[in-house]
Amino acid sequence: MNVKLNRRQVGDVAVIDVSGRITLGEESNAISKEVRNLTAGGSRKILLNLGDVSYIDSTGIGELVAGFRSAAKAGGSMKLLDPTGRVKHLLQMTHLNTMFETHDDEANALRSFV
């Protein structure tokens, strides 16, 4: 299964629910493309829900970084919700856990956007 994205709005936060595998392939830039589309449309608060991500590779990690940079370049922020064990592990191994603000609870994540 490839990556699937579902966008929803919760107040002024754009939430992207991600499911499946974030890997090299024809949809490998789906996340950063979605973040660019959101920021082009004026969204500045983006929450990436990774709770249903079954697998991520180095391309997927690169996608998270590209999305983060796109949001920051537009004057916004992107935070991660419920990263699975594999995502957490890769973020720690690459020391990117210091770049991404992560939350385990959606309500807390939404409140963190001030």
Image: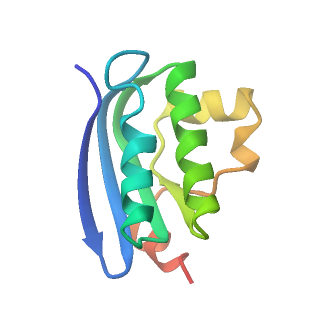
Where residue 65 appears, as percent x and y from the top left, is: 61, 41
Q: Is residue 100 above or below residue 18?
A: below
Where residue 103 sits in the image (x, y, percent)?
Answer: 53, 58
Q: Is residue 1 left or right of residue 25?
A: left
Of residues 82 and 40, which is closer to you in this image? 40
Q: Quadrant of the N terminus?
A: top left
Whether residue 100 can be seen here: yes
Left or right of 26 in this view: 77? right
Q: How many marks?
A: 0
Does residue 110 appear left or right of residue 97 in this picture? left
Q: Residue at x 73, y 26 (%)?
A: 93
Q: Residue at x 63, y 61 (%)?
A: 72
Colour convention: rainbow
Residue depicted at 36% across the width and 33% down the height: 53
**x then y, percent, for residue 21:** 34, 24
Relative to 89, residue 45 above or below: below
Task: Find residue 107 and report its image quarter.
Answer: bottom left
Q: Residue at x 72, y 50 (%)?
A: 99
